[in-house]
Amino acid sequence: MPVDEAVAFQGIICQPATGEGEPEFRARWATAEAKIRALQPLTDFNADPRPLTAPAQAAASALSQDAAFKAVFGPLPPTFASVRLDRLLTAQKYVDAMHVDGLQVPDSDDEAAVLEFCMRANPIDPPMVGADGGITFSSHYSQNLIPLNPSFRVVSDREVCVTATIISRPNYVQLTIWNGRFVIANGYHRAVALLQAGHTRMPCILQGTPLEGVGIVPPNFFDTTRLGAARPPMMSDFALGVGFADPLKLRARNHILRVGFQVQQFEAPR
């Protein structure tokens, strides 16, 4: 992005580094941009998708029958595959390094365990009931909470129970194939954790959804111009010691969801 956009972007999501003002940030940005422009073009973006091993595929088949899974993907299960980490494009510009460090990565020889690691959902914290009767959910994870359509259950001919169901968005590792390139759509922290633990492949869900359809839009994500470049941002650029990642202190935010019922009473002709 242009430097003015970078200044505005980091001003919204980041806390300034100690002793750093705008001139220092602009200088740091210019150094990083020069380093990026010096990168050599890449010629191979094929992530070599392969079928899962039998135990991992059995776990994937069981997962696809889960109610939360079906709520996200519908009745037809998506394609599961194993892909090369070093051929994946990153559309997301940053990850929470502290969250990555806290993840327990399974051994690479147990693909079923790695699949479970890549397909877990985040727990829902206990909600709070307000004075107005509204129920508030709060989550550290962005877009973690999904409200399903309200429903009702007939208890008896004198009682009906009306319910609103909230589920934790299954935080599956997902890739979308865009112009022959494999772009991570979800699951960045686990992908980085696998990369840092020395894994070379990752089980995932493959989709053909357009980038905009999975929420990959600026400013939090790179635009298609950058993703379509001869040397786009790659998952491997997040690896420790490669020199392409720069530490930033993000502002802490929680994802909030409020649920309530509105009751109306009026007369209508029979």
Image (tube, rainbow, N blue to C red):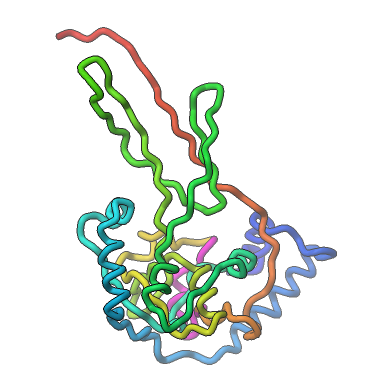
Magenta span includes 70: no
Q: What segment carries the magenta color? A: 220-234
Residue farthest to the right?
19
Residue 222 in sight here: no
Q: Where is residue 111 in the image (x, y as percent from the top left)?
A: 38, 78
**Residue at the image point whose x is 85% and y is 64% from the top:** 19
Q: Main secondary structure of the magenta part?
A: loop
**Left or right of 23: which side holds 136?**
left
**Residue at the image point whose x is 35% and y is 74% from the top:** 178
Q: Position of residue 104 (x, y in %)?
A: 54, 70
Q: Position of residue 147 (x, y in %)?
A: 39, 41
**Left or right of 207: which side holds 108?**
right
**Left or right of 2: which side holds 27?**
right
**Left or right of 19: which side holds 148?**
left
Q: In this view, does 175 lie above or below 219?
A: below
Q: Is residue 17 above or below residue 123?
A: below
Q: Nearer the viewer, residue 224 or 181?
A: 181
